[in-house]
Image: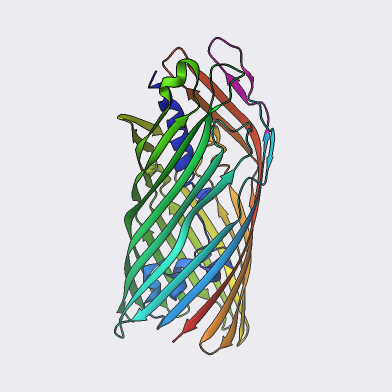
Amino acid sequence: MRNSGIAGAAALLAAATSAQAGGFQAPELSVRAQGMSNAGAAALAGADALAWNPAAIARSGREGVAGLSFRQTSLALTDTGSTLTRPGQAPVPAGGATRLEDAAEDFRAPSLALALPVTDRIAVGLAVTKPFHLRLEYPVPSFVRYDLHRNRIEMTEVRAAIAVRAADWLDLGVSLDAQETRAALDAASPNLAPASPDALQQLTAKGWDLGWGAGAQARFDDLTLAVGWRSAIERDLDGRLSMTGLAGPLATANFDAPAKVGFSTPWTLTVAGRWQATPELALHAQAQRSGWSRYDRIDLVFAGQTAAIVQAYEDTTSVALGAEWRARDALTVRAGVGFDPTPTPDLMREPGVPDADRTTYALGATFALSPAVDLDLAAASADFDAARLNRDLAFYAGTPAASSATLRGDIDRDELTVGLAVRTRF
């Protein structure tokens, strides 16, 4: 019954990689932009805008930025009728804890950026950010255990860019983006005997993958228009996948083997604008299209077997509006609001991706500590729409041991993020 482990492993990998959804695409790339809910981020100039637009450093001069954002997530899941069905038996409650709170760990997002002019028209830059993040840990046992016990996903990006002042009014830039992915996932699989403890699936995987970016900024008196592009990235991770604790006729499906995981994360197209309405007031707007339909399948190879897990993610468009007010020479205050729809379909929402449409409200400020040093502060509150878990899992399909689980529940989530950055010109 060797193939009985594939369904469980496939379910685990679906939780592992679908966690790269928009709901877990970390927006904490720049503290200054965060203070406007990232409105107009691609139209800003400076090293800390490099993560949004490689053209942003063409006129910034020598500049370095070091930032740290701290995100606190409140997440609660409530069981509304999850069940487990074993072969030849009627569905029974999934069991385990039915109210799960504080499952999401707090997130610290460091960011570094550097811009250096090479000539009066060419500049190079480097930015290090964490564009994706997810850390979930549910109690054992819980009603969601057959989808997820524990989830650790971290992506770190190193972006190297070159920008050119192509004309007095036009800046262009390109970048090479290297991203490291590290993942660790645990989930349960049911044994056939109701009194037997669950088996455990465990995955670890990591790898480096390359993408590219491009951007432009056009300046017309008091108006700046910008466009930024990030390519889709084909992920190719090496890791290890195991199944332990299967008993009775399922015992032959226990294994521990190398694994390869392949999938694609989306392209993004960002369009932004900045209008200097008065000498003191600047208005910002931004729209971002994310090609989540590229994330159409997960390819898994392990122990001489293959599996393809179909996903149903949808392209999304997020929007944001913001404003900056120069209150005095040494103080600029800002605010913004953004709307980010989830790419996860309602009929496939899982505990590994407890996502929903979100609206983010942000405030920020910049204090000029000296002619060469600025301090950026930001705070943002994300309000998530009510959403429901809707996850169907199949185990040991095509064998006499075929079993299934249906996960149904309510999701209650909100987030608070604060950030601080120091910008220096040298």
Q: Is residue 65 left or right of residue 126?
A: right
Colour scheme of the rendered structure? rainbow
The location of residue 362, given as percent across then percent down, is 63, 64
Residue 36 in which image quadrant: bottom right
Tally of marks: 0
Q: Quadrant of the N terminus?
A: top left
Any magenta on residue 91? yes
Residue drawn at the location 35% of the way across and 59% of the way down = 178
Residue drawn at the location 39% of the way across and 77% of the way down = 115
Name above or below for residue 91 compared with residue 143: above
Q: Is residue 396 visible?
A: no
The location of residue 17, given as percent across then percent down, is 44, 42
Name above or below for residue 355 compared with residue 275: above
The location of residue 242, given as percent across then percent down, is 43, 34
Residue drawn at the location 49% of the way across and 41% of the way down = 185
The location of residue 394, given as percent across then percent down, is 49, 23
Q: Is residue 267 visible?
A: yes
Residue interval drawn in magenta: 79-93
In this rendered view, identify the residue nearer to me: 77 or 166.
77
Q: Quadrant of the C terminus?
A: bottom left
Residue drawn at the location 41% of the way across and 36% of the way down = 241
Q: Residue furthest top?
A: 88
Q: Residue furthest right?
A: 99
In this rendered view, identify the residue nearer to me: 253 or 361.
253
Any magenta on residue 268? no
In this rendered view, identify the residue nearer to me: 405 or 391.
405
The secondary structure that dominates the magenta segment is loop
